[in-house]
Image (tube, rainbow, N blue to C red):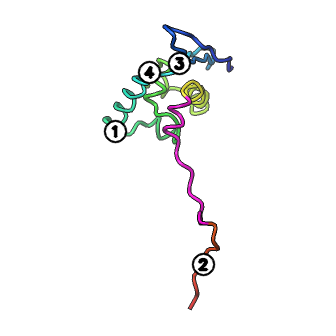
Amino acid sequence: MLRPYLRTTTGGTVKLSKIITIDGRDITLKELTVEEICNCMDAVTKGKKVDELDVIMDGRLPAEAVVRSCAIDRAELRALTPTALEPIWEAAAEVNPFFARMVAKPEAPAENPSGSPSKKPVNS
C-alpha cells in the first residue's frame, strides 16, 4: 500500500519520505542527503563485488542506496521476492528522484541520429 509523501523540515531542510507496507510491515523510505549519496556511491564503487540485489533490480538505484534509504539490511531484502522488492525500489526512487536520474541507464541511441537516410550495404 502506497501512502502520500511526507515532507519534513529539519533546520530549514526539506526531506521527502514515504511509508509503504510490505507483508503487513510498514517501511519508511527517506530522501538521502548529498553526503549520504556520495557515501553510497563510494561504497558501491569501492566494493567491486557484485551485489545480487543490483543484478535483480538492474538499472535502478543501487541496493546500497535502498538499504540506506529504508534502514532494512541486505539479508532482509534478500529474503523477499523480486515482486516484493519492486515497490521498495520504486518508493526509494520516488523519494530520491535526483539520485534515481543520476544512476538511470541511458537510452540506446537512435540508429541514425543525423536524420539522413541510412545507406544499406550493397550485396555483391
**Label 4 amino acid?**
Asp
Observer-side mark, 2 or 3, equals: 2
Q: Is residue 2 left or right of residue 103?
A: right
Observer-side mark, 2 or 4, equals: 2
Where residue 33 appears, as percent x and y from the top left, is: 45, 21
Residue at mark 1: 49
From mark 4 to mark 3, how far is it between C-alphas?
A: 15 Å
Question: Nearest the camera: 90 or 106?
Answer: 106
Question: Nearest the camera: 56 or 116?
Answer: 116
Which secondary structure lies at badge 3? Answer: strand
**Residue 86 colored in magenta in the image:** no
Q: Using a 10 Å C-alpha cutoff, classify the residue at mark 4 as few (fewer than 14 neighbours), some (14 to 19) or many (20 or more).
A: few
**Residue 100 colored in magenta in the image:** yes
**Which is nearer the N-term, disc 2 or disc 1?**
1
**Label 1 amino acid?**
Lys
Q: Which mark is residue 73?
A: 4
Which secondary structure lies at badge 4? Answer: loop
**Label 3 amino acid?**
Lys
From mark 2 to mark 4, how far is it between C-alphas?
A: 53 Å
Residue at mark 3: 30
Observer-side mark, 2 or 1, equals: 2
**Which is nearer the N-term, disc 2 or disc 4?**
4
